[in-house]
Amino acid sequence: MDMENLYDLFVEQLRDIYYAENQLLKALKKMSEKATCPDLSAAYSEHLEETRGQIETLERVMQSLDLEVKGEKCEAIMGILKEADELISETENEAVRDAAMILAAQKVEHYEIATYGTLCAFADCLGLDAQAELLRNILAEERSADEKLTKLAMNLKNGVNKTAMQEAA
Ligand SMILES: [Fe+2]
Ligand SMILES: [Fe+2]
């Protein structure tokens, strides 16, 4: 697709993240079963539900702009998910795998935060107030998912990490 103005770029990125969220939905389903730590598993399941809602919200955004609802292949998310898959399949120790899952999930969240943050700014510039508000709701969910993961990572010392570190010693 030729992008000649900010609106075109906005639409292209909207479709990119729509594709990414659909891939993430599949990945989260698969990965939530691999977590050992109950808090991590809960964080994955909770975000899985949020992702479902985000996909619907993105569909609303596209429909509100009379756009055909469709995704556009996002190479970046495929790369992040491929790396996550490799990392997880290479960790046999459950505690270490949980730590790898936190890492993989945080990389995804940061990718999403970057995209939604920019999409919100673009929507503001384009005067798309209603769409900006919908996208801001998603951005808030991504930020809070990221914060939860940071807390889990910090708690690794007490839970996941303790076992992981002991086994490393
Ligand atoms: Fe998302
Ligand atoms: Fe997310």
Image: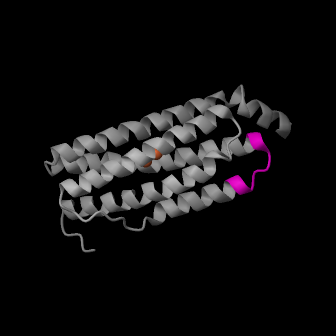
Give the answer, above or below, for where 7 lies relative to 149: below
Give the answer, above or below, for where 156 lies relative to 121: above
Residue toward you, 77 or 49: 49
Q: Is residue 104 left or right of residue 72?
A: right
Q: Is residue 117 left or right of residue 130?
A: right
Residue lying at the far top in this picture: please name it.
Answer: 158
Residue occupying image coordinates x 75% and y 51%:
91
Residue lying at the far bottom in this picture: please name it.
Answer: 2
Asked where in the image residue 37 lies, by quadrant, the reply is top right
Q: Residue 116, how many percent across, how many down?
A: 34, 48
Q: Dividing the image into 4 quarters, which one contains the N terminus?
A: bottom left
Residue toward you, 65 or 167: 65
Indicate whether residue 84 is drawn in magenta: no
Q: Residue 92, how many percent across, how many down?
A: 79, 50
Give the answer, above or below, for where 46 lies relative to 69: above
Residue occupying image coordinates x 38% and y 47%:
54
Indicate whether residue 90 is drawn in magenta: yes
Residue occupying image coordinates x 71% and y 25%:
158
Q: Is residue 153 visible?
A: no
Q: Dividing the image into 4 quarters, which one contains the C terminus?
A: top right
Q: Is residue 73 left or right of residue 85?
A: left
Q: Is residue 18 visible?
A: yes
Q: Residue 148, how many percent across, how many down?
A: 52, 32
Report the magenta residues as a range.
88-95
Asked where in the image residue 3 lies, by quadrant, the reply is bottom left
